[in-house]
Image (cartoon, rainbow, N blue to C red):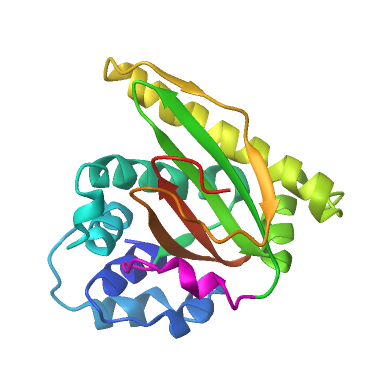
Amino acid sequence: MSCIEYSQRLLNAGLLTPKELPAILSGEVSEQALRERFGKQPPDTHPARSAVLQAAKGLRDIEQEVTAYADYAELFTASLYRFLKLSSLVIPQCLDASVLEDAPHTWAVAQHITGDVSIVNGIIARDEVFLALARRYGGDAVEDLKGDATDALEEFLNVVNGLYIVELANRKIEPDLDFPLANEDVIPRGSHQLLLRIYTEAGDFVLVLSTDAFL
């Protein structure tokens, strides 16, 4: 297993705290140290998915959506690595939207998957993290938060969701994609909503999953 795989499993087991994640993501913690800390934890081949299921545990409002949310989050984290070259760690706890009320200025992008399903997914990040994520996808020429950065992350989200609707189509589900949207200082209030904090080398941000619009 890699450092990231060990770390996600340790997070899920409650043996790692968010404060320790930046050092791990920057390569300051060895795989050996994490392996020793891991001990004899049970094997898990889908730790990111397990983190989402753990975050949603006990939330009756999303009982019908949790499997789809876990599927999507697993694809999303894999896409962060594939397209942005970013490792990611999912905090296995549901965030309350109120944590964003006192946050520094943020930007958000979101997209609605429609058709036989209704899933809205999106990213909310502080300005500096939003820009860093956008540059990972669009290159160093991305400078303007309102223009270049939102365009880049809308495109990234569209690519991820394109992959997701292919997965849905393979299950005989007929989905469609609305155009992605962007806004600033969003406090998400979607139905059947799940908010997850994700840590990467570019900083931490919130992944929002719901069944209707939250921008």
Decide which of 36, 174 is in the foreground and name it. 174
Residue 194 as seen in the image, left or right of residue 36: right
Q: Is residue 180 visible?
A: yes
The residue depicted at 71 percent of the width and 60 percent of the height is 132
Q: Is residue 45 visible?
A: no
Residue 158 as seen in the image, left or right of residue 32: right
Does the magenta segment cover residue 31? no
Residue 179: image quadrant is top right
Horizontal and vertical percent position of residue 125: 62, 62
Decide which of 57, 51 is in the foreground and name it. 57
Which region is colored magenta? Answer: 91-103
The residue depicted at 33 percent of the width and 81 percent of the height is 16
Decide which of 104, 149 is in the foreground and name it. 104
Residue 86: image quadrant is bottom right
Counting every numbered tag in the picture gives 0
Residue 143 as seen in the image, left or right of residue 191: right
The residue depicted at 81 percent of the width and 51 percent of the height is 146
On screen, 15 above or below 88? Answer: below
